[in-house]
Image: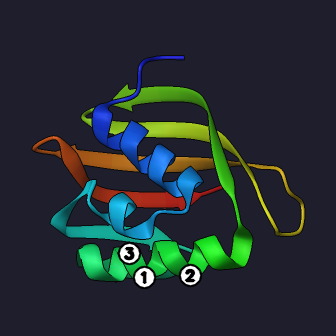
Amino acid sequence: MNTLPQAIAGYIEAANAGAPERLAGFFNPDAIVHDEGHERRGREEIAAWARDTGMRYRSTIEPAALVETAGRHRLTATVRGNFPGSPIPLNFHFQLQSGAIQSLEIKP
């Protein structure tokens, strides 16, 4: 697999460590996350989302492949946790800006 950009590697490490505030620090202040049909804006909402999903799912992310196209990074990963069908493959669509995550969309 390709080497992960620093912001994406930090996101995964913080997510796996259950550290929502640290995770939010890898996002730009005006970043957006799309997950489970909802949108979260800004680091405060992103930290709250990470805290909530972390408590509900106790999930871990295991990167499998990274593809960069037109400045966007699609990370395919195996996600394991406390949810039906675990483990499942998910795609994390990252848009980076100024070395941080500007947007993230998570989908199957």
Check residue 105 in the rendering and tell me which mark sits there, or answer none: none
Residue at image location 65% in from the left, 77% down from the top:
55
Q: Residue 48's spot in the image, x, y percent?
A: 42, 82
Badge 2 density bin: few <14, some 14–19, many ≥20, Cα 10 Å: few
Residue tagged by mark 1?
A: 48
Q: Amino acid at mark 3?
A: Ala
The C terminus: image quadrant: bottom right
Q: Residue 61's spot in the image, x, y percent?
A: 63, 46
Residue at image location 46% in from the left, 17% down from the top:
2
Q: Amino acid at mark 2?
A: Asp
Residues marked 2 and 1 touching at CB (< 8 Å): yes
Q: Quadrant of residue 29?
A: bottom left
Q: Residue 59's spot in the image, x, y percent?
A: 69, 59
Tell me the distance, in whole angstroms, between the alpha carbons under discs 1 and 3: 4 Å
Residues marked 1 and 3 touching at CB (< 8 Å): yes
Element class at badge 2: helix
Q: Residue 68's spot in the image, x, y percent?
A: 37, 28
Check residue 47 in the rendering and tell me which mark sits there, or answer none: 3
Numbered-mark total: 3
Element class at badge 3: helix
